[in-house]
Image (tube, rainbow, N blue to C red):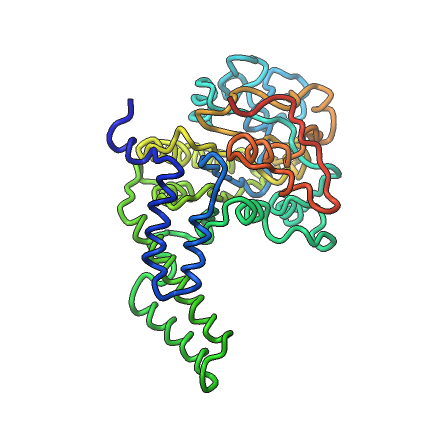
Amino acid sequence: MMNGCEEHKALTRRSFMRRSTAALGALALGDPLLNSVASTYAQSAGGTGNLLVLCELAGGLDALSFLAPYQNGIYQSLRPNLALAAADVNPLPNNGDYGINKQFQYFSDLYQAGQVAIVQQVAYPQANGSHFESQEIFKFGVRNLSSNPGTNGTWYERLRKTYFDEPFGVLDTRAIGDPRNFGYPDNTSRNAAQSAFGRLARLKAGQTSAQTGVLDTYRRIDQIAEDLRTRTQSFTSTGAARGEFYRAAALASADLGTQILKLRYGGFDTHASQESANATLFPRINDEFQQFVADLQALGLWNRTCILFYSEFGRRNAENGSPGTDHGEGGHMILVGPQVNGGLHGQNVTTGDLNQRSLPYYVDFRGVFSAAIRDWLGFNPRPIFQIEGETYDENIGSSLFV
């Protein structure tokens, strides 16, 4: 049974849209551009109203340091310094050959509760070992941006524009930072910006439509930023960490119709001293994520949230002389939430896989994103990823959601 706070937060999409449209409508008085935004907001339809949180682990997460085939002799021999032993992992309850690194203790607890789905050996055909290019491929959903005119923004922005063209439909914590300071939070900054835009619009006698548009755009940005600040002022976290997950929780608390939150943690390019780097990175992700889940539970949002962790590629099976691991190919994508179909998905790591330079590619990353779009958000993913010149295998082999 939900308490009063949870009942307040567990809004139906229809009631939420009525409230949000009224709020934006009030802001839009005298502002035709914002009025257009409010009108678009009201016309959003379809979908489940669930929240998808995209957490990019930039630099190339070493999948074998997260989920280790710790009893495999080849794995142990390839990593004399970095291999995880039985004492370093929590064995999976449904497959004792694998264990989750104890530095991800909260992930292990959620796995035990059936709330973690690990899709193994995910990449894309003809893997690219460049951080920049591979991150771009995951971000835009295509391999060659210059030859594909259909990309038109990141895949999640294409999704927003196709299905829920709302001003807050997709929010990126890195772009917004602390939402309570977003835009022009004080009169000094606001007046300076207004003066600058005003001078630009008065360069010629009278205002052209373009000049009017500049001022209207400023007013729209300022008013939307004010709405975001106002709606996050009362957010109180359950913990002291102030990382990207904290910002994501603050944005989720705003009740602005957001369907995708994007955040990013870096530092996973562990060519050298990987053990000490992971000893800092892994507990930080684990603890800040645990605080995020507690925040969502306090907000009454946890039951309709799925968090999807991904990295641009995995790392080599064998350690180098540093000791660390170099850029590889296949990695794991991890889905967490109360409605995921917990357990191992994709292709289990075999001795044959470990005997290759890096884990091979069995599941296309777009198949995992597509499953989240289709089965969690309730939209058809094909117009988003199957654009001109792009084809991919959607098959994962099992359902990622219950």
The foreground one among 264 and 76 is 264
Provide residue 401's location: percent of width, then percent of height. Answer: 53, 24
| Location of residue 10 in the rendering, given as x and y in whole percent from the top left corner | 34, 33
Q: Left or right: where does residue 133 sit relative to residue 215?
A: right
Q: Using the rendered image of the protein, determine whether residue 277 is visible from the camera's viewpoint.
A: yes
Residue 97, relative to residue 12: is it above or below? above
Please identify the quadrant where the N terminus is shown: top left
Q: Is residue 242 visible?
A: no
Residue 399 relative to residue 225: left or right:
right
Q: Is residue 211 above or below residue 150?
A: below
320 above or below 341?
below
Q: Is residue 290 left or right of residue 1?
A: right
Residue for point 51% across, 35% down: 377
Classify residue 285 by image quadrant. top left
Viewer-side residue, 248 vs 224: 224
Q: Is residue 180 left or right of residue 332?
A: left
Name the residue located 65 percent from the left edge and 36 percent from the top edge: 321
Quadrant housing residue 19: top left
The residue lying furthest to the bottom in this view is 205
Q: What residue is at 44 percent from the left and 56 percent from the top?
A: 37
* Camera-nearest residue between 354 and 80: 354
Residue 102's x, y, as percent?
47, 24
Residue at horizontal 49 percent and vertical 44 percent from the top? 262
Quadrant of the image occupied by residue 6: top left
In the rendering, at what x and y percent does residue 164 appear? Answer: 50, 45
| Tag count | 0
